[in-house]
Image (cartoon, grey):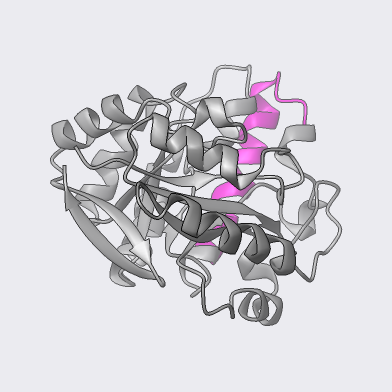
Amino acid sequence: MYLADFHTHSQISFDSTAPLDDMALAAVGEGLAELCVTDHCDLLDEYGLNVYEFDWYGALAQYRASVPVYAHCLKLKLGLELGMGHIDPETSRKILDVPELDFVIGSIHNLSPQAGGSDFFYRDHSKASTCYDTLDNYFASMAELAVTDFYDVLGHIIYPLRYMTAPVSLERYWEQIDAIFRAAAERGRGIELNTYRGQTIAEWRPVLEHWKACGGELVTLGSDAHTPDGVGGGFREACDLLRAVGFSYLTTYEKRRPELHRL
């Protein structure tokens, strides 16, 4: 079984303190063939303020130092999780203009600028009405992102549900999600199955079914690990789910080009 974790964070991300070497060592221990570090670059910070740059100096320094150490046992890839890339095309193009970049996750972590731009994490999602306000805003932003060039896969489609304690359903959004998926599939892009370090797997079945029905073929696996103990979490179960839904391949990326590996 070919296993590759294409959503991980290191000390370059604001919410991780893990050196890339520690994440790579964990990947080897989990039997992974590839590890892609995808540190955060959100064009809105957690309070909704604009961001115009990314620490490529630090990211490239640790990546270049780690690659030769693990070359004999692990393909180490350089990625980026670009948040809200659609709101500032000029900044997005500038940030992504890095020859060594292998992979870009397009994510939405924040409300739209028009709604204040704050991170979903800071909202009180104990009421269903607030949850649906967030989801309305979230999928509207994702629809804007889906028609841009600022991603290879759409990240963690069900992301806001992590923070919602009120009972909510995606039923009212499937038509909108399908339109997003068709836009991504037509552009040769993919989605990720984000296991949230092994905590969310079964929840992905309807998402994967809709992705496949909309012509989607490319799926990456991501643990969203911010510490070594989360790397590769739930991947074997996730591969079983992909096969059950009818997918034959796991996708990885090199220099922004997809590569397929039979499940």
Question: Compared to 218, does 194 lie above or below?
Answer: above
Relative to residue 141, is residue 33 drawn left or right?
Answer: left
* Image location (x, y in percent) of residue 23: 55, 39
Residue at image location 34% in from the left, 39% down from the top: 32
Which quarter shows the N terminus? Answer: top left
Question: Compared to 218, does 93 lie above or below?
Answer: below
Residue at image location 66% in from the left, 43% down from the top: 19
Residue at image location 70% in from the left, 74% down from the top: 88
* Magenta-span inclusion, residue 219: no
Q: Is residue 223 visible?
A: no
Q: Name the residue nearer the viewer: 64 or 3.
A: 64
Relative to residue 57, is residue 73 drawn left or right?
Answer: left
* Image location (x, y in percent) of residue 167: 55, 17
Report the span colored magenta: 123-144
Q: Is residue 224 visible?
A: yes
* Image location (x, y in percent) of residue 148: 50, 73
Question: Compared to 150, does 23 lie above or below?
Answer: above
* Image location (x, y in percent) of residue 90: 68, 82
Question: Compared to 262, does 49 lie above or below?
Answer: below
Relative to residue 196, is residue 54 drawn left or right?
Answer: right
Q: Name the residue nearer the viewer: 3 or 152.
A: 3
Which quarter shows the C terminus? Answer: top left
